[in-house]
Structures are given as structure tokens and as C-alpha cells.
């Protein structure tokens, strides 16, 4: 995805300002973060916008590739194939998609599954993730930077660890 430099700077400022406002939103699951991290890959027509229809089309293709037996459903044994095709699915498990609990994921369960990460990222609720929403999604899916432990005083060596020499 190519974003003009000026537009990118504006987007980064907007994302930064949103983060500084203290509105972190609801906690995201590992599956949601995984999806948010790779959501731009579902941009089927490469227009820098991901729509609900593009997500469903991509999900349909993924389902067809994972359904090696052509049975019209995925079993628990076939489910790991999804993660090999698309890393997003390494963050979720079989039960996430097996909505009726019958031990199989049919095409409708998979393709029509409401994607909470997409809904979360779609701030204006138009079923389209625009450039700013995609940038924000990638920012939110990044792991937090590790915090350095605070040192409360001078570090001293305890008598039990000193060599005495």
C-alpha cells in the first residue's frame, strides 16, 4: 500500500493524537490483533480500502483452499491448514468459527462470521476500512513496547554474592 508522505504524516499525527487522548477502546483478543495486523492483505482490488465484501471474498477463497476434501466443511484436522495459508488464523482456534458447536465449520459459518476486529477497526461503520482505519489497525495490532523496570535506588551487591577477595 502506497500512501503519499504528506498523507502518511497526517495519518500518523491522527493516530498519535487518538492514542494520547487515552481512548484505548476495548481490549483486543489475539485473534483480533492478528486480523488487524494483516487486514490490508484482504484488499482484493488494491485500492487501499478493505470492504466487508472483500473480506468475505477472501474468506471464501481461504475456505476453499483449506477444504481439501471438498466436503463443504472444515474439520478440526483441516483447520490448521488455514494458519499455513494465512497467518491471521494462527491466532484463533476452531471453536471461534464453529458457531453451532457441531464439530464442523461450514462455508457459511466461516465466510459470514461477524469479524469483531473488522467491526472494531471500522470506526465510521461504513463496512469499509479506509487508509486511516487501516493504519490505525496496524498500529493497534503492534505489540506494546517493553517497559524498562524502574530503579528505586542504587544497586548494591548483597553480602552473600560478594566474593570477599
Image (spheres, rainbow, N blue to C red):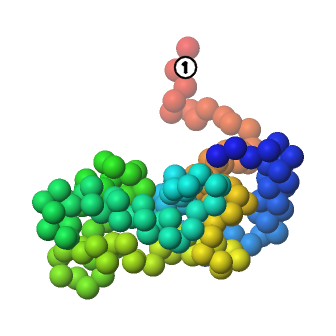
Q: Which residue is mark 1?
A: 164
Q: Horizontally, is 115 left or right of 45 in the view?
A: left
Front one among 112 and 9: 112
Point 68% across, 36% down: residue: 155
Q: Horizontally, is 159 left or right of 7 in the view?
A: left
Point 47% across, 73% down: residue: 115
Point 68% across, 63% down: residue: 130
Point 25% across, 57% down: residue: 66
* Quadrant holding the C terminus: top right
45 versus 5 height, above or below: below
Q: Position of residue 117 (x, y in %)?
A: 53, 70
Q: Position of residue 27 (x, y in %)?
A: 57, 72
Q: Horizontally, is 90 left or right of 118 in the view?
A: left
151 versus 69 height, above or below: above
Residue 32 visible in the current orientation: no
Q: Horizontally, is 80 left or right of 143 in the view?
A: left
Query: Within 10 angstroms of label 1, few (less than 14), some, or many (20 or more) residues?
Result: few
Front one among 39 and 90: 39
Task: Label 1, secondary structure: give it.
Answer: loop
Q: Position of residue 120 (x, y in %)?
A: 60, 73
Q: Residue furthest front?
A: 45
Q: Residue furthest top?
A: 165
Q: Quadrant of residue 60?
A: bottom left
Residue 42 visible in the current orientation: yes
How many numbered marks, from 0 up? 1
Q: Position of residue 6 (x, y in %)?
A: 86, 46
Q: Quadrant of residue 2?
A: top right
Amino acid at each position: 500500500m502506497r500512501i503519499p508522505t504528506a498523507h502518511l504524516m497526517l495519518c500518523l499525527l491522527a493516530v498519535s493524537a487518538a492514542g494520547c487522548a487515552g481512548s484505548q477502546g476495548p481490549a483486543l483478543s489475539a485473534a483480533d490483533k492478528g486480523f488487524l495486523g494483516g487486514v490490508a492483505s484482504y484488499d482484493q482490488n488494491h485500492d487501499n480500502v478493505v470492504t466487508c465484501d472483500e473480506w468475505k471474498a477472501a474468506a471464501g477463497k481461504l475456505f476453499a483452499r483449506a477444504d481439501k476434501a471438498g466436503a463443504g466443511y472444515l474439520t478440526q484436522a483441516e483447520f490448521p491448514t488455514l494458519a499455513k495459508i494465512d497467518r491471521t488464523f494462527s491466532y484463533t482456534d476452531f471453536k471461534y468459527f464453529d458457531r453451532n458447536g457441531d464439530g464442523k465449520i461450514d462455508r457459511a459459518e466461516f465466510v459470514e462470521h461477524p469479524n469483531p476486529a473488522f467491526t472494531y477497526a471500522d470506526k465510521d461503520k461504513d463496512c469499509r476500512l479506509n487508509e486511516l482505519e487501516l493504519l490505525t489497525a496496524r498500529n493497534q495490532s503492534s505489540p506494546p513496547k517493553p517497559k524498562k523496570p524502574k530503579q528505586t535506588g542504587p544497586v548494591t551487591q548483597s553480602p552473600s554474592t560478594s566474593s570477599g577477595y
